[in-house]
Image (cartoon, grey):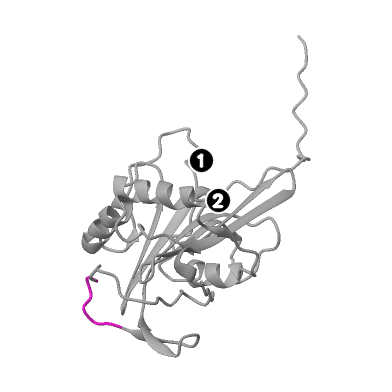
Amino acid sequence: MAGGKKLHFKFCFFVIGLAMTSFSCEDTTSVIYENSVLGKQQFVHTIELIAFGATDDSINPHNRGYRADFYAHFNLSNDSIYTRQQISFFEQKEITAKLGFCNSLSTSKELVDLLAVIKQLKPGLIKQTNVPDGVLYCGKDYCLVYTCGASIKRYYFTRFNLLPEFEMFIDYAENTEHDTTLIKDDSQFDEDNVLSNIVNRVDFPRFKTIPPPVVSTVGFTPPAILRD
């Protein structure tokens, strides 16, 4: 880690920052949380991004049949990042998690442009153009949670005709897994807790059925074709 910094992540709802950023929140009311590690009160300023997939393990009241195919946590108070991606293919699951600091996070164009839109955009389901007839699947469903002091905004969307600022930020978030300054993280990730705080909300849009992971056996027999 640059500058000898040590990163502490605790997955409850968000990670507590070390210092205030230059960003200002739309809501001037602030919530201050106790940081048990440093013994100091800190201001919370974070972005969480979740890409939903279908669980291939067990459905329970916490996950409601969803899983976090991709999860990213950006702490804007100290420019720290945590990302986690899981891919299932032919009954094999690969999980990659990384964390670290990014000195350019707070000033990145993708983040600055996104925050400018969020400041004006009402939270909830982002309206999109109707899916064309015959299209069964238009990619993953997402949730973005922006927390700034007492203000919490949740946005739900797909990537079909998505606002360009959200589109660019998703690309930025997903590409952080290739950032060589981040280190691999093997700590326990409480996926059900993260999902429960999203999918069990009354404003969660109950996304369309998500195609399950590819499996090696398919219980399907094609119909017989008879010759004339």
Quadrant containing the C terminus is top right
Observer able to see residue 158: no
Per the image, the residue denoted by label 1 is 137
Taking depth in this image into account, of 212 and 130 the one nearest to the observer is 212
Q: Which of marks 1 and 2 is nearer the N terminus?
A: 1
Per the image, the residue denoted by label 2 is 209
Observer able to see residue 27: yes
Region rendered in magenta: 25-30
Q: Is the magenta stretch mostly helix, strand or loop?
A: loop
Q: Is disc 2 placed on a helix, strand or loop?
A: loop
x, y percent for residue 13: 48, 75
Residue 26 highlighted magenta (yes or no): yes
Callout 2: few (<14), some (14-19), or many (20+) C-alpha neighbours within 10 Å? few
Taking depth in this image into account, of 169 and 101 the one nearest to the observer is 101
Q: What residue type is labelled 2?
A: Thr
Residue 13 highlighted magenta (yes or no): no
> Where is 167 relative to 40, above or below?
above
